[in-house]
Every structure is written in C-alpha cells, then in structure tokens.
Amino acid sequence: MESTMARLAARVRVPLLILVTLTLVGQLPFGYDVPWWVAGPALLGAFALYAWVGRVCAEPLPVEPPVRGSWRAVNSPASRVPSHGLHAYGQTYAIDLVFASPAGAPAPGSGFARRASDFPGFGQPILAAAPGRVVRVRQGQRDHRSRTGLAGLAYLLVEGMFRELLGAGRVVGNHIVVDLGAGRYALYAHLKRHSASVRAGDVVEAGQEIARCGNSGNSSEPHLHFQIMDRPSPTFAAGLPFRFVAGGAAVGTPRTGELLTDAPPAPSTLLA
C-alpha cells in the first residue's frame, strides 16, 4: 500500500505544483483573486508532495557502476533518502558521481564560471549499468560553464527554477533512458553534447559505453547523475533503489564524499 501511494504521488507531483504555481501567478494578468487561506495551503501542500512525499520501498536492483576509475559521490542514497532532498523526477535514490582527479593532477582553476573542459571528468566514458533496450536519447543541449562557489550555486538555483518550467528535459540535460525490464528504467543525465553512441531501440549490455560525461542541464560541474525509476519519463516516475555490484560481487554504494573505485581508471585514449 505504501509503495502504491508513493507511485501515485510520483505521477501527479510535478504537474500539480506547476498547476498551483501558474494559478497563483495568473492572478495578476487575469485579474481573478484566490483567497490567501486557499492559496497558502494549496502551495504548501503541492510543494510538500513535490519534495517529501512518495518513497518507494523495494528490493535494491543490482547494477554495475556506470563509470570506471575513481569517482566521488556528491549526493548519495547511502547517506540520505531522498538523496537530493527531493522525491521529484524519480530521484529518490539517485546518485551524483564526480570524477576524482589522479593524485598530483592540477585541479580546475577558481572562478565563477569555468569551461566544462577544464574539469577532468568532462568527456569520461559513461557505461551501461545493466543490460536493456534504449528508449530515449537526448543530446542536443550545450555543455555550459560551471556553477560552483556561493555565487555560482545561487545562480544555479534561480536558473533551475526556469528549467523546471521548461520541463524535466531541461533539468536532466542531455540524457539516455534504458528499459531494464520489469518496470525499471535507468537514467543517465547531464551527458556531453552529441556524445551518445546509442540510439532509441538499441540493445545494450552492461559495461558498454553509451555516452560521455558532460555538463548539460541543471548541473554545477561535469558529473554523472544516475538513477533507477519506474517510468521512462522522470516527470511521472518514482525512484527505485539499486546497489552496485561487479562480477557478481557487491561493491557497495559510496556515501556522500566517498570514492567509488571498483575498477581501474579508463585509458587516456578514451578521453575526449
């Protein structure tokens, strides 16, 4: 029953919040009036559903790490659920992975907005975490500059609000969705522009390269956002749990700040 209600919440949360917001904003241009005692609870309830309601409890799906080398978890379901502070867009159990620079390698320079290519993770291979059939490939969005530091993150927050109004596609940026069967879909987000090596309808195997790491969509710096969900569209999806395995053995999902280092680094010849 709990999972059924969580899945129902996932189907309506984003459309409901947009509907309530547009209804309230529309008072100014269209001249109608919504009483405060209606507007306040409606907006609060819609946001609560968007952010905090709807955790699906299920057996974690074993998948292989979608990257090779050393990657640091920035937002991890091993540390908190929902990992990104929200259930919206099926990201309850999502993980963000940032490529860890090799020891002795220079770190990206400081600054409000750095080029994506300044980061060592930009262009790193992204691999299929499990076998399945590709159902969506979107790769036309640009890789924008970084949004790091306090000023950059503040800008990212405001920018993210406008992206949400344009739909989930502008939030996840260039992305690939793979149908894993049994009502499970893998989402690989913030990919590098025009880096996808698969098309809708292709069958992929675990470990197969499908794209490169980028900085498209609502992203502060080049990284991979990975999640499992119960629908191909993150707008109407509920997030599902997963666990990393390699060769049939458990790898463990890194906590926020920890490294995922299950395999040797990707050869330099694979870098863009």
Image: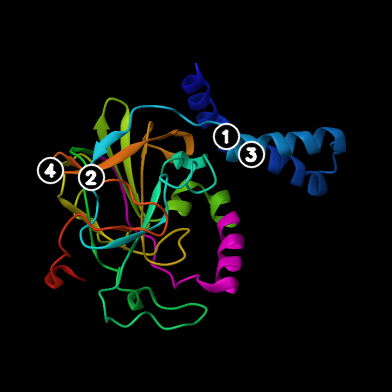
Residue 123, picture quadrant:
bottom left
Q: Which residues are magenta?
A: 134-161
The residue lying furthest to the top in this view is 1
The kind of secondary structure element at disc 4 is loop
Mark 1 falls on what kind of element?
helix
Q: Amino acid at mark 3?
A: Leu
29 is higher (above) or lower (below) than 140: above
195 with respect to 49 (left or right): left
Does label 3 or label 2 sit earlier along the sequence?
A: 3
What residue type is disc 1 on? Arg
Q: Are dots 4 and 2 in contact, CB under 8 Å?
A: no
Cα–Cα gap, marks 2 and 1: 28 Å
Number of the label disc, if any, that sits on residue 17: 3
- Circles 3 and 2: CB atoms closer than 8 Å: no
Instruction: From the viewer's perspective, tell me whether residue 252 is left or right of residue 198.
Output: right
The residue that label 1 is drawn on is 13
Q: Secondary structure at mark 2?
A: loop
